[in-house]
Amino acid sequence: MPDNTWLVVGLGNPGAQYAGNRHNVGQMVLDELASRIGATFKTHKTPSRVAEGFVRPGGPKLVLAKPNTYMNTSGGPVSALLKFYSLGTDRLLVVHDELDIPFDTIRLKAGGGHGGHNGLRDIQKATGSPDFTRVRVGIGRPPGRQDPADYVLKDFAGAERQSLPMLLSDAADAVEAVVEQGLVAAQQKFHAPS
């Protein structure tokens, strides 16, 4: 593998019935990235669908991966992909939904806890490390007393759907910024007050 290869994992659940759920926003971002690099997702030797390509000619290589397992068991496929591509967690970038960030907001971080996110928890357990980069896509808190577990498994609401293409584009931009410019530069760009 080239030295500048990144494994970019989009978290979500497999199957058409989950495709539009808030919990699947990580995989939606990967669709945007795959479109940009002209790659198609294919079945892989690991339990994932993978698309590969370059951010730009001579630029970082992206291995875009959607685990074929449910969100809560994402760790096995991610660990298998890291082994397959001979990459460490320093070259792992996970794109996921984040309840504690308002909808239409992107936040970037490296390391830290899982914040109750079962997909992140399982990746940390399977890789033995919390030290990977995250692109956190804000989906906001559920309204009223709605159970967060139900909320994340619902599709985006009408008004959200109108803004969703821009949010996915911003998150894809954030992934590209991390792999091309580094986390700190990307944070300065995406965390700046608008």
Image: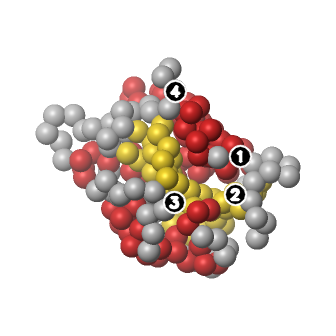
Residue 67 position within the rendered picture, expressed as x and y whole percent measured from the top left: 51, 66
Mark 1 or mark 2, earlier in chain? 2
Residue 12 position within the rendered picture, expressed as x and y whole percent measured from the top left: 44, 57
Mark 3 near mark 4, Cβ–Cβ under 8 Å? no
Mark 1 or mark 4, earlier in chain? 1
For the residues marked 3 and 4, what is the alpha-carbon distance in whole angstroms?
Answer: 22 Å
For the residues marked 1 and 4, what is the alpha-carbon distance in whole angstroms?
Answer: 18 Å
Between marks 1 and 2 in the image, the one whose residue lies nearer the viewer: 1
What amino acid does circle 3 point to?
A: Phe
Mark 3 near mark 2, Cβ–Cβ under 8 Å? no
For the residues marked 1 and 2, what is the alpha-carbon distance in whole angstroms?
Answer: 11 Å
Task: Name the residue that disc number 4 marks.
Answer: 192
Front residue of 186 and 34: 186
Residue at coordinates 33% horizontally, 62% vertically from top-left?
118
Task: Name the residue that disc number 2 marks.
Answer: 62
Tell me the crowding category of disc 2: few under 14, some 14 to 19, or many 20 or more residues within 10 angstroms, Cα based: many
Mark 1 near mark 4, Cβ–Cβ under 8 Å? no
Q: Residue furthest top?
A: 194
Tell me the crowding category of disc 3: few under 14, some 14 to 19, or many 20 or more residues within 10 angstroms, Cα based: some
Circle 3: element type: loop
Q: Is residue 171 above or below residue 58?
A: above
Mark 3 or mark 2, earlier in chain? 2
